[in-house]
């Protein structure tokens, strides 16, 4: 049997433990502080038309770190950051790192009970959120006994005087005012107390020390905290630049992917700030605003999920736009269909861009991306090749036995970015993070894929999402790729519906292109198309039209929502 373990082809003399690239051995903040010393006058981030230099950023982080120590935050404490992409997020994230605490990243649009779970699961001592989300925290304070301090941020904190007036007259006026007697600390007061702390506030950390908790469903679909180290993030920052040699300090990244997600935090934030890049912070975006920001800031890099790009292609504001500024366009977080990739590439070419969209793959268990389409080499349907110092292999699911090239199996990966553990889940940690016979730690991703002899990886499907119908394995992403290729279809989502005879039967939810009627005639056209392009056993028994498909908090199509709706419908009919 062929050994299908592969490392990135641009590497030479790979050692047992990844050290080909020059990784920052200290903390995440050490990496950013070092680059800030080299480029103090470069812009670290842009927020609502205001620019903030690296020198200013360093001062803000150090003040915030002193303020945290003044609250009593100690090394190893958890601090929950429940914010969109605003300056407070960056400042607090690195200040937490500077004092040796652990940042617990939470989406601010999470429900009350979800936030309570995140706070309790992490045993967070302190948390920060925006004033507009205070009601959620207020409702759960009695359910979160470990939470001692709640810091309230305001968008106005980092707006120019003119922007403050405009904000307060529009969005700001809709936010319920928080009574001064509430048990909170407002950001402005919090930062003013920093000079009062005179003790030591810098805690030196090494790469393997825990630094961040990100939440994901893991291989079982149950939400759990993934503990990641400083080394994981610093390694990723080095890998991103190594796979994008066109990057230069001062280049801009449109930072729309949220910081609570590994894709946003790892690629769009830390990889930029640890290398002298500039983050264009997008606290809340629509496809139209996203398109406008690309044009306004002449962004060099953009990263997003497929649904974001699909929506961007339909924006009138992009008509005639010059995108020659783009050096990199990255798609991740979900499968990019072959048809959508073709559409994006055609769109980029028509708008003067000299590059194509590059698909990547990764899991939160290794921060985010660990595989990327090479700059000048791609294969249709492939998610690319492993990052420097990262190994991939395909094994029989549930085993460590490698399969031959081209044969489907579970994707496993090893490298410097892998997680430390699932917080409070030792059994699942042991199942997912395994030391193989080669002595290396491998992450069993729970994803199905193949590898060819050139080291290109092909993602097939999450193992748990595979549909089994009449004994056949059906992969929703493959059917979606076929349906999406039809000229009447904007986007689709395929799910398995319980069936007494077949175990599961296939159903397709379809979002039609604008102007296409959602009637029986259109449905029949799609049925005939499917019959010609899909195996009989995998044909959808039903096609349901939707004006919009449900999305997860990071913009993926929420297929589980559709599955739950179908289960409820079946239950109500029985």
Image (cartoon, grey):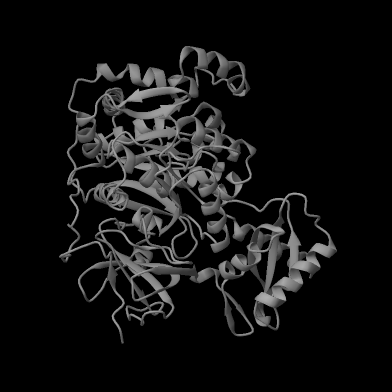
506 or 322, which is in the foreground?
322
The residue positioned 31% from the left and 27% from the top of the image is 71
Q: Is residue 290 visible?
A: yes
111 or 434, which is in the foreground?
434
Q: Is residue 424 visible?
A: no
226 or 455, which is in the foreground?
455
In which quadrant is the C terminus drawn? bottom right
Extreme residue in the bottom direction? 1
The residue positioned 44% from the left and 27% from the top of the image is 47
> Total label count?
0
Q: Position of residue 147 (x, y in %)?
A: 41, 36
Q: Position of residue 76 (x, y in %)?
A: 27, 42
Residue 435 relative to residue 85: left or right: left
In which quadrant is the N terminus drawn? bottom left
Residue 502, above or below 432 = below
Question: Image quadrant of residue 492?
Answer: bottom right
Residue 265, above or below 73 = below
Residue 129, above or below 118 = above
Residue 343 relative to residue 521: left or right: left
424 or 108, which is in the foreground?
108
Residue 310, above or below 197 = below
Q: Position of residue 26 (x, y in %)?
A: 18, 43
Residue 333 relative to residue 539: left or right: left
Q: Position of residue 22 (x, y in %)?
A: 17, 50
Question: Image quadrant of residue 448?
Answer: bottom left
Residue 507 relative to residue 445: left or right: right
């Amino acid at each position: 049997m062929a050994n299908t373990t592969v490392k990135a082809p641009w590497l030479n003399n790979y050692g047992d433990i990844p050290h080909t690239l020059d990784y920052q051995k200290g903390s995440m903040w050490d990496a950013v502080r070092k680059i800030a010393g080299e480029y103090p006058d470069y812009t670290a981030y842009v927020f609502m038309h205001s620019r903030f230099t690296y020198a200013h950023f360093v001062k803000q982080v150090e003040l915030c770190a002193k303020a945290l120590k003044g609250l009593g935050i100690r090394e190893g404490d958890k601090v929950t950051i429940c914010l969109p992409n605003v300056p407070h997020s960056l400042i607090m994230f690195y200040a937490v790192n500077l004092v040796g605490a652990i940042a617990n990243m939470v989406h601010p649009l999470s429900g009350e009970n979800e936030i309570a779970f995140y706070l309790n699961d992490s045993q967070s001592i302190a948390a920060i959120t925006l004033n507009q989300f205070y009601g959620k925290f207020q409702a759960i304070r009695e359910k979160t006994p470990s939470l001692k301090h709640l810091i309230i941020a305001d968008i106005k904190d980092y707006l120019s005087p003119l922007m403050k007036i405009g904000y307060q007259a529009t969005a700001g006026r809709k936010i319920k005012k928080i009574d001064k007697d509430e048990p909170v600390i407002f950001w402005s007061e919090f930062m003013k107390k920093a000079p009062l702390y005179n003790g030591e506030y810098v805690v030196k950390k090494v790469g393997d020390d825990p630094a961040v908790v990100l939440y994901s469903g893991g291989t079982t679909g149950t939400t759990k905290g993934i503990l990641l180290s400083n080394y994981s993030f610093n390694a990723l920052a080095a890998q991103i630049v190594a796979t994008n040699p066109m990057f230069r300090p001062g280049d801009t990244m449109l930072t729309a992917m949220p910081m609570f997600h590994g894709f946003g935090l790892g690629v769009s934030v830390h990889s930029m700030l640890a290398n002298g890049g500039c983050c264009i912070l997008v606290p809340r975006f629509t496809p139209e605003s996203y398109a406008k920001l690309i044009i306004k800031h002449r962004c060099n890099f953009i990263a997003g999920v497929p649904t974001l790009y699909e929506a961007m292609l339909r924006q009138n504001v992009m008509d005639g736009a010059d995108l020659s500024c783009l050096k990199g366009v990255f798609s991740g977080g979900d499968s990019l269909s072959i048809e959508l990739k073709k559409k994006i590439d055609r769109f980029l070419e028509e708008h003067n861009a000299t590059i194509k969209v590059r698909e990547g793959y990764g899991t939160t268990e290794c921060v985010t991306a660990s595989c990327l389409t090479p700059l000048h080499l791609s294969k249709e349907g492939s998610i690319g090749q492993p990052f420097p110092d990262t190994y991939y292999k395909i094994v029989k699911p549930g085993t460590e036995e490698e399969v031959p090239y081209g044969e489907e199996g579970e994707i496993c990966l090893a490298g410097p970015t892998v997680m430390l553990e699932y917080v409070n889940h030792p059994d699942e940690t042991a199942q997912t993070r395994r030391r193989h016979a080669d002595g290396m730690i491998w992450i069993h991703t729970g994803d199905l894929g193949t590898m060819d002899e050139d080291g290109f990886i092909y993602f097939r499907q999450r193992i748990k999402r595979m549909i089994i119908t009449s004994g056949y394995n059906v992969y929703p992403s493959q059917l979606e790729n076929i349906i999406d290729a039809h000229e009447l279809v904007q986007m689709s989502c395929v799910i398995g519906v319980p069936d007494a005879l077949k175990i599961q039967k296939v159903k397709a939810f379809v979002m039609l292109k604008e102007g296409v009627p959602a009637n029986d005639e259109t449905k029949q056209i799609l049925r005939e198309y499917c019959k010609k392009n899909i195996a009989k056993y995998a044909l959808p028994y039903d096609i349901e039209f939707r004006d919009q498909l449900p999305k997860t908090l990071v913009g993926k199509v929420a297929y589980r929502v559709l599955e739950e709706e179908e289960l409820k419908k079946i239950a109500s009919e029985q």
